[in-house]
Image (tube, rainbow, N blue to C red):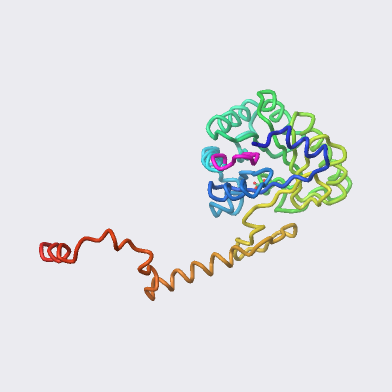
Amino acid sequence: MKKTVKTLLDMKAKGEKIAQLTCYDYTTARLMDEAGVDMILVGDSLGMTMQGYNDTLPVTLDEMIVYGRSVARACKETFVVLDMPFMSYQISPAQALESAGRMMKEAPGISAVKLEGGVHIAPQIKAITEAGIPVVGHVGMTPQSVNALGGFKVQGKGEENAERVLQDALAVQEAGAFAITLECVPPKLATLITKKLDIITIGIGASNGCDAQVLVYQDMLNMTTGGIAPKFVRHFANIGDEMKKAFTEYQAAVKDQSFPAVEHTYPKSDCSDEFLASLDAKY
Ligand code: KIV
């Protein structure tokens, strides 16, 4: 059965931890759904993982809808959240509602949208939730504000900043969100925020004091070559090395002609030698 907002809130009420991963394509989403992953985030991190940008800012609403559709089509049980990209909601609550509405209409199977920001973005969250669209908030390190924050850095350091992150989280709840991502928030603060909120806290670099966890799937599978993984990443497999090994072996097999072998061809469908000889002579 497809997980719903209620399923997830019931899990929080029972103290059952919730697992979320990012995902951007049908094939991977099917594997996650079959593995029983509770939630998928079609994150705008796809700007970096799928499109090769340095940050998430260039990603467009149209692009998010295409990726969102592909993932949603694969998920029979997993709850799918679609990220609202930079400048698709910041201008006004009306703009936010219009963008969220497009996402829900044009990416069928999506169950919620996510947007970044706290106190200042609460009117947008209110407008979207009042239209019946479930919302996940996102505070702490908010990647769309990377230029204002001076880099991808831990947030909530120091008393004043810690209080601001808590106020942001409370504002997101007050505006109607059912969950909130806490990114790069120190552990004791993340635990306090989780205690103060009735909604689900989803941590990324925010400790197991949160109700749920999320990781970017290329990070947890160690598929990102060359870059240094953030401190909060655990590599659950070394798929990057496995893929590189397979690509290298394929390249070598084509060169030395060990691939394709006879068993990879369709000899029974071939015409007779006589007929092929006649074709050879004719052309
Ligand atoms: O876009 C994304 O993948 C995210 C996660 C890092 C939480 O926002």
Toward the bottom, the furthest residue is 256
Residue sitting at the far top:
130
Observer-nearest of 67 and 185: 67
Q: Which residue shows up at 67% across the image and 47% down it?
A: 37
Q: Position of residue 269 (x, y in %)?
A: 27, 58
Q: Where's the N terminus, which quadrant?
A: top right
- Reply above or below: 202 against 257: above
Q: Nearer the viewer, residue 83 or 218?
A: 218
* Residue extending furthest toward the left: 282
The quarter holding residue 275 reads bottom left
| Residue 78 is a magenta residue | yes
Residue 227 point in image, percent of width and height: 63, 63
Segment colored magenta: 72-82
Residue at image position (39%, 69%) is: 259
Question: Is residue 108 placed above or below 254 in the rendered structure?
Answer: above
**Which residue is painted at 70% across and 30% down in the image?**
125
Quadrant housing the C terminus: bottom left
Q: How many marks?
A: 0
As for residue 66 lying within the magenta part, the answer is no
Front residue of this view, candidates 211 and 6: 6
* 87 horizontally vs 116: left or right: left
Q: From the viewer's perspective, tell me whether residue 219 is left or right of residue 249.
A: right
Image position of 272 (left or right of 255)? left
Q: Position of residue 202 (x, y in %)?
A: 75, 44
